Image (cartoon, grey):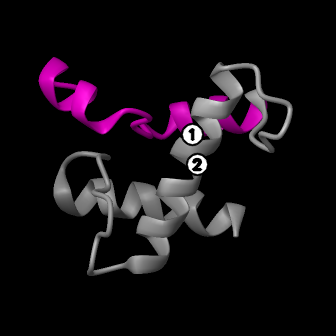
């Protein structure tokens, strides 16, 4: 499942010209679910929660493909 989102997110970005996959994205619900889980785990990781399974390596990989962790913040900053 990790690789699914890693490969689908850039495809979404190429089509939409941004990487802000919306919550409940109806055209690809699996991608929407995967993105929602990554964002939730990221919040836990940043709070120092031990129950987060997200690693710094995965955060780095997703950052490299332009993954948007906080979509509203990115929209207002103009991040794509």
Q: Is residue 45 magenta?
A: no
Which secondary structure lies at badge 1?
helix
Q: CA distance from mark 2 to mark 1?
A: 10 Å
Q: Is residue 80 visible?
A: no
Residue indicated by mark 2 = 38
- Of the two numbered discs 2 and 1 on the same chain, state the one appearing first in sequence: 2
Q: Residue at x 30, y 53 (%)?
A: 13
The quarter of the image holding the C terminus is: top left
Magenta span: chief secondary structure: helix
Drawn side of residue 18 relative to residue 24, left or right: left
Q: Is residue 51 visible?
A: yes
Drawn side of residue 4 relative to residue 58, left or right: left
Indicate the quadrant where residue 28 lies: bottom left
Q: Residue at x 70, y 70 (%)?
A: 1
Drawn side of residue 15 relative to residue 70, left or right: left
Q: Which stretch is magenta? A: 57-80
Q: Identify which residue, 19 or 51, lies in the foreground.
A: 51
Mark 2: give few (<14), some (14-19) or many (20+) Cα within 10 Å.
many
Q: Residue at x 71, y 39 (%)?
A: 58
Residue 53, x across and y down, in percent: 80, 44
Against 47, residue 59 (above or below) is below
User: How many numbered markers are drawn?
Assistant: 2
Mark 1: give few (<14), some (14-19) or many (20+) Cα within 10 Å.
some
Residue 64, x across and y down, in percent: 53, 32
Q: Circles 2 and 1: CB distance less than 8 Å?
A: yes
Against 69, residue 47 (above or below) is above
Q: Nearer the viewer, mark 2 or mark 1?
A: 2
Residue indicated by mark 1 = 62
């Amino acid at each position: 499942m990790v690789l699914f989102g890693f490969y689908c997110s850039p495809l979404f970005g190429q089509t939409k010209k941004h990487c802000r996959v919306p919550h409940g994205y109806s055209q690809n619900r699996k991608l929407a679910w995967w993105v929602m889980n990554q964002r939730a785990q990221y919040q836990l990781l940043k709070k120092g929660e031990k129950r987060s399974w997200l690693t710094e390596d995965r955060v780095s990989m997703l950052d490299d493909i332009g993954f948007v962790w906080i979509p509203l913040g990115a929209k207002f900053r103009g991040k794509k």
